[in-house]
Amino acid sequence: MSMKQTLIVIGNGMVGQYFLDTLVNSGLTEQYRIITFAEEPRPAYDRVHLSAFFSGKSAEDLALVNEDFFAQHGITLYLADRVISIDRQQKQITSAQGRVMAYDKLVLATGSYPFVPPVNGRERPQCLVYRTIEDLQAISAAAATSSIGTVIGGGLLGLEAAKALRDLGLETHVVEFAPRLMAVQLDDGGGAMLRRKIEALGVEVHLNKNTTLIEAGQDCLNRLQFADGDSLETDIVLFSAGIRPRDDLAASCQLIQGPRGGIVIDNQCRSSDADIYAIGECALWNGQIFGLVAPGYAMARTVIADLQQQPASFSGADLSTKLKLLGVDVASIGDAQGKTAGALSYCYQNEAAEVYKRLVVSADKSRLLGAVLVGDASNYAQLLQYCLNGMTLPDNPESLILPVAANQPAALGVEALPASAQICSCYDVSKAQVCEAVASGCCSLPELKQRTKAATGCGGCAGLLKSVLDNELTKHGVAVSNDLCEHFALTRQQIYHLVMVEQIQTFDQLLSRHGHGLGCEVCKQAVGSILASYWNDYILKTPHIGLQDTNDNFLANIQKNGTYSVVPRIPGGEITPDMLITLGQVGKKYQLYTKITGGQRVDLFGARLEQLPLIWQELIEAGFESGHAYGKSLRTVKSCVGSSWCRFGVDDSLSLAIELENRYKGLRAPHKIKFGVSGCTRECAEAQSKDIGVIATENGWNLYVCGNGGMKPRHADLFATALDTVTLMRYIDRLLIFYVRTANRMQRTSVWLENLEGGLSYLRQVVIDDSLQIADSLEQQMQHVINSYQCEWKTTLENPQHLQRFRSFVNTDQPDQSLAFIEQRGQSFPAPSLPVKHFPIIEEVA
Amino acid sequence: MSQWIDVCNVDDLVADAGICAWVAQRQIAIFSLPKINGVFAVDNLDPFSGAQVLSRGMVGDLGGIPMVASPMYKQHFNLETGQCFEDQTLRITVYPLRIHQSRIEISL
């Protein structure tokens, strides 16, 4: 067995970790023993989304790597230990904690540090920087006793930092030396529009301000003194005036550096010592430092290839970016400022809608050189493709940024993109890779994301990815049909719309007007669900009976032997001892197998059809209601005891859970819906794995949406923060009805969101900003559902005609003799019958 | 030669759904599809799950053929022939049925 060589990676930031991830997948771990040093006390986390820390995400949420990763791949990780010197002759490094280690190959991924301008007074209290989680904790602590915060620097990072201050509830100022915001990426028009939008959000912007002194303030802790004589009082000063490469280690061992810092690397990312590589923000390539993650990732891939002795070279990176700053869409592509000789510009400015767009094209108007988008970056991906691939522009390039009239879509056909076109820049996924994944069987956006990782970084390319997917499917002869089934050439959403517009009340009305044939279990269930969502009629009314699957039809859950299980509602999981005793008595009397469910209720198994009404009679007399466990509807609202009992509880999660469960019980939807409410960020109710999750904070409720466990678990996304209960419910009302109206059949909220064009930000616009102006209608519909709620079991028991159907046989009262049970652990189970066969799940769409 | 066995009243049928009858020690599923004036009797046993549940399946048509979908794993069966749509080798028993003086009668 040959000895492994030693590879040491210094720095475990985003690029360092990406390098390790790629290394592990490359098989190079067979060849190298891997050691990595991290100066920070925790492994890599997502610095790009750092401001999310102040809108409810924890350090754990931001983590990019799970604890097992290092052990699993045999990588030695030293946390909170900084490498302080490199001895290139001996090929060994020394760390601050005194570790001395020999290396064969060394990778420097030391990153950068925030540049603090040499202003007098910069060391005063609460003058901070914004880069690490420790920095955030310091900012957070300072904010607790402050009311005004000021960011020095109006670039990309500065505006991110401003968002953090605003999320902390501070009056927020941004001070910029240059005459515009984001001076590097934007032009004057774009910068002005961005300023206007940001100021509308309550962040005050001060341009052309050269800070000369920081001194003690009168009303605040600090005062900024500017060169023009003005001054600004502020409690917190946050420096965000750019980054500088962390190249001190390289300097100590005489690796060649650039005149203004940075470790000089060649196209293989090798420093002036062939055994030492440098990647990410510490590296200087062709005189450039790249302050974005994507070029750092590209460097990491280059090093891996070089270690594998494969030809690879880093050839610079496109610095186009699309991001959301303080909720404002901003994008910059290529030569955004039109510096190329002979370049021509097209501008579109809409002050009413607060949108600014500029195209920079070549002198002959055939090529796109750059673009600026502020307020609406929806055609970023399209423009980027034109720019990167040198594609010929249409005769009227302005059509690419003018508002699209209904009859003249100016969209770039994805067919025209070359195979090499980069679809996802975060993960460097080309069109060819996407096509290959589709050819090998990925037929949906979620599958494609999972396979290729495309659109899982910033998500900016999701729309483009979907277009490529649809185009490829069509080419493969897969009809991209969203028809519900052979009886309706309509999508679920279209049918929902027809039901609303034409006020259709029954399946037969819909079938005779818009469908054909008799229907099938697919369309009947979908239409049954739509009618139930919209009208909220009793689902077993005569015209609806045939539309219900057996679970809805008998208001219970069918089990493998044809018996049913019964789940009464226990709102929030809170139950009195007396009611618990009733459950025990009923279970015992009917010899039901009993089990606690994951949703904090009790499931009683093994009831025969004719027993269901008897069981429910007793449950209803004791005060229980139907739990709708059988329906594609609201199931449970799981909760912790919150501030009512828990010594850590921040708010009364239990009361809220009960209120939410009672509010939304009975709502029928395209799929089941689960809620969770936690009383503090310890999150004992696991709200972040639910369709709707609520977590109490000191500032109010944080709302998470579209998570689920199950076949494909998905963490819920943070949707809104610091809400009062009324606003919280208003958002949930709107979001749920929007889901009910627009989702496909059997589509859970998670998949719905993944497929929703515009994703989370679009959903926020609809629900929070009411961009479609349907909020009233959504709320009214929810109110109708709430007002017309009935316990379906109570209604059933009151109606002898409905009860008729609850019997095993139409012509005799004898029970079904074919059922056999065995006893295990003191309870009754179905007797094994046929050999167990496993069937593919035809029904679940996830 | 067939002998008709009295099962139940026509009023016991549920439109566009099924009911189950106990006839000569067998469970028989009976479906009513009024849009095509069809009433069908088949064996209640779902061959895939081994449970007596077909009477609780949903009915309709696939390509114009009247069918029932098993409530367990959703396989479809032709109500006229008993043929399973998903598995050519499987066929459930269908029983002749007639309506005589407002009574449902079947022949085993």
Image (spheres, coloured by chain):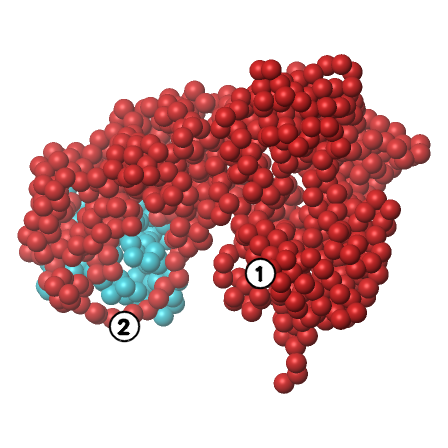
- Crowding at dot 2, Cα within 10 Å, few <14 / some 14-19 / many 20+, comes out as few
Three-letter amino acid code at disc 1?
Tyr
Circle 2: element type: loop
Q: Position of residue A278 (x, y in %)?
A: 75, 57
Q: Is residue A507 visible?
A: no
In depth, the one of A99 and A276 nearer the eye is A99
In depth, the one of A486 and A673 nearer the eye is A673
For label 1, the residue is A78
Q: Quadrant of the N terminus of chain A?
A: bottom right
Colour of chain A in the rendered structure image: red
Q: Which residue corresponds to the image point at 65% horizontal and 60% vertical from the top-left? A: A95
Vertical placement of residue A232 versus A723, above or below: above
Mark 1 or 2 closer to N-term? 1
Vertical placement of residue A35 versus B61, above or below: below
In depth, the one of A108 and B25 nearer the eye is A108
Looking at the image, which residue sits at the far right? A341
Q: Position of residue A781 (x, y in %)?
A: 37, 25
Quadrant of res A340: top right
Which chain shows up in cyan?
B
For label 2, the residue is A835
Q: Is residue A689 visible?
A: yes
Q: Which residue corresponds to the image point at 60% horizontal and 43% vertical from the top-left? A: A132
Circle 1: element type: strand
**Is disc 1 in contact with disc 2, using a CB cutoff of under 8 Å?**
no
Quadrant of res A338: top right
Looking at the image, which residue sits at the far bottom? A1
In depth, the one of A572 and A168 nearer the eye is A168
